[in-house]
Amino acid sequence: MIDIEHVSKVFQAPSGDVQALQDVSIHVEKGDIYGIVGFSGAGKSTLLRLVNRLESPDTGTVTVAGENLSSLSKKQMLLLRRKIGMVFQQFNLLEGKSVYHNIAIPLKLAGASKAEIDKRVGEVLRFVELEDKRDNYVSQLSGGQKQRVGIARALATSPDILLCDEATSALDPQTTESILRLLQRVNREMGVTILLITHQMQVIQLICNRVAVMEGGSVVEEGTVLDVFGQPKTEVSKRFVRTVINDRVPEAFTGIVREEKRNQKVDLLKFIGDTVKEPLIANLCRMEGLEVNILGATIQEMQGSVMSVFILQLIGDEEKILEAERRIDKAGAIRERLVMDHE
Amino acid sequence: MNDVPQWQLWFRDEFKIKWDKLADALGKTAYMLGWSLLIGAVVGMVLALILVLCRKEGLLRNRVVYSIVNVYVNIVRSVPFIIAVFVLYGFTRMLVGKSYGPTAMLVPLVVYISPYMARLFENSLLEVSPGIIEAAQAMGATTWQIVTRFMLPEALSSIVLALTTGAVSLLGATAMAGYAGGGGVGDLALTYGYQTYNEKLMLLTVVILIVFVQLLQFLGNRIASRLRAHK
């Protein structure tokens, strides 16, 4: 649906050139909710704007719905933009106008008749559950309601693709979740492919099926959400995963590890879905000459699957610990040894 | 003389001038102010749109056009109005056929006020959030649609205030234009008031001008705040 191939872009600034994008390639399939995560300045905002040509690349190609964007005339580009909705962090609504007026604008631009506009505005308002706010002024709405209007406006022209620019970053956690659920419905019920950028890993965790991690203008890691959360390869990805999945020994328990004088190792275990069939931890506990202490455990829901994370303190002879670790690996859990500060 | 109402006689005794003369002056001032404001605002808006659209971050980035308009606006704004009237003598004669009277004065008034309006409107248009413009672009709006459906409506209340400020400045200029051959309240104050030591009449014209400015400002603020009510 969206193919970005080997795209680079440099911005000229008074302080020198800034490499906004560096040989970036991503592929978004029809039906995806594809997330791009990165800290500010990573280039994700520029990348997103390539898709509706608010930015154009210096080199590389961008193909949307089979059309190479650089080959489109200005007029064709305007027509294509009507099939791509966009939602913004700051909503970018006409605050002094009614909800109806805001949602009707893209339809008016496209030359729809009054009857068509009324019908479509009603439909999308029902979808975002704001039917009763039709004639309210946008300035009277809460942040979450404004974003619902923003989404309704983006959906008005029945787009195939929705671009979300930090759509939930200005909202509180509860509202964020309801907006994410709404985006999920947009994807499932309307069949809209969603490409979103965010710096919040929860957003990726809750609704995305694929994720690209960006740093310094490059995509440093890309894959399914379960893969990237399960085994992040780069330091940035690990930092992001850590914001939602705690993989550290809780502060209060570090003393337990530090004061343990016997031979020990601290291991982080991740279980994705039901890939591990045996009662692994129970089996470890039954091992002769091995003491197992659970220092931390969390369960995260993502992508309709579950990822559980355990932090285990294994105490015993080196030989025993190694045997336990082999057992963990054989069972199919993802294991990582944590290095404690005092070591 | 019998059919002249009592109060007009009183007026004549008091200010040493016929009421008709003042009414005529008021009419001329209103004529000059109204038309030069209207034409000046249209020209000013065109200039402002060129400045905003062609600037570096604008939708139609064009350095050459921007520079030309920018320099033009700066040059004209640095010429005092009374000098502009005389500099433009020939040009006015060419356009209107004569260089005196209220209609002829519209030429220097428009030339004088339009770059000023352009700067005020430019500020109003720049107040429109870039996010709104970006949203409009993302919807597939043409540049014309962005201007007419997003920039102008969003900037409207600010534009009304700019128009008010422009009108007040213009009122001052019409007084000078009057003296330079346009007639009107300014002319009345100077030729009949100042030169014949009629201080009462001078005072009256000053009061009229003050009331005029107050009215304009009140009206402008009121319309602007009504437009802004839902922001």
Image (tube, coloured by chain):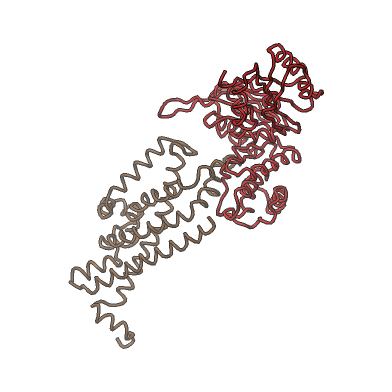
Give whichever of A28, B196 is nearer the camera.
A28
Residue B104 lies in quadrant: bottom left
Q: Does any portion of residue A66 appear in the rendered image?
A: no
Q: Is residue B111 above or below residue A38?
A: below
Q: Measured from the top left, where is residue A11 in percent x and y?
A: 48, 28
Q: Measured from the top left, where is residue B93 in percent x and y?
A: 31, 54
Q: Measured from the top left, where is residue A316 in percent x and y?
A: 69, 16
Q: Which chain is brown?
A: B
The residue at 65%/18% (across/down) is: A264
The residue at 78%/23% (across/down) is: A280
Q: Is residue A175 above or below residue B201?
A: above
The residue at 35%/45% (across/down) is: B73
Residue A135 lies in quadrant: bottom right
Q: Which chain is red?
A: A
* Number of marks drawn: 0
Q: Is residue A197 left or right of residue A322?
A: left
Give whichever of B6, A255 is nearer the camera.
A255
